[in-house]
Amino acid sequence: MAKKVTNTKKKIIETVSHIRISIYASFNNTIITASALHSGNVLAWTSSGLIGFKGAKKGTPYAATTAMKTLLDNLVKFKPEFAEVYVAGAGNGRDAALRALSGSGLKVTKIQDVTPLPHNGCRPKKARRV
């Protein structure tokens, strides 16, 4: 019988000195993504639900802190030095994730709020007549 030959592709880990961290904090969950600043390739991502929090616990500040610590552990192999942080959403995990990032040793060069705001938006519900 012939021996099977399998072509295995070796994963080459590039070192990225500048990264972009995007934090989306909704009321139900917190999703954090890290990508290379110049190429835009996603290096790692995590969320409160991915870690194992379920239901209402996903939206808590503790879950967001845990998600950020997990993401930073995954980023160690890329050896990042500088980070630009973009925050969207109005959830509880927003400030907690930033606090966890500040104690990581990564140099944060920019923090920007990119929460979408309506320019007059949808028509409101009719006023109640009591």
Image (cartoon, grey):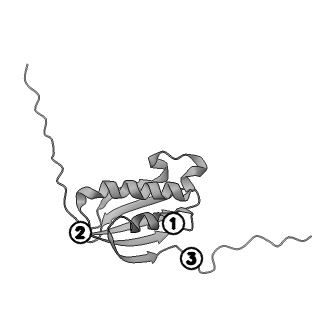
Please name the residue shown 8% across and 25% down the image: 3
> Marks 3 and 1, Cα distance to the nearest angstrom?
17 Å
**Is 12 placed left or right of 19 in the picture?**
left
- Residue at figure coordinates x 16%, y 53% from the top left: 12
Percent of width and height locating residue 15: 20, 62
Residue sitting at x 42%, y 76%: 111
Q: Position of residue 99 (x, y in %)?
A: 45, 67
Q: CA distance from mark 1 to mark 2?
A: 24 Å
- Dot 3 alpha-carbon crowd within 10 angstroms: few under 14, some 14 to 19, many 20 or more: few
Discs 3, 2 touching: Cβ within 8 Å: no
| Quarter of the picture holding the N terminus | top left
Work out whether 58 lies above or below 112.
above
Residue 53 picture location, percent across and down: 52, 47
User: From the viewer's perspective, is 130 left or right of 36?
Assistant: right
The quadrant holding residue 104 is bottom left
Q: Residues within 10 Å of mark 1 (few under 14, many from 20)?
A: many
Mark 3 element type:
loop
Q: Which mark is residue 117?
A: 3
Q: Amino acid at mark 3?
A: Leu
| Element on which disc 2 rests | loop
Residue sitting nearer the eye, 105 or 29: 105
Task: State if disc 2 and disc 1 touch (CB < 8 Å).
Answer: no
Mark 3–mark 1 contact, CB under 8 Å? no
Mark 2 lies on residue: 17
> x, y (%) of residue 66?
45, 54
Label placed on residue 94? 1
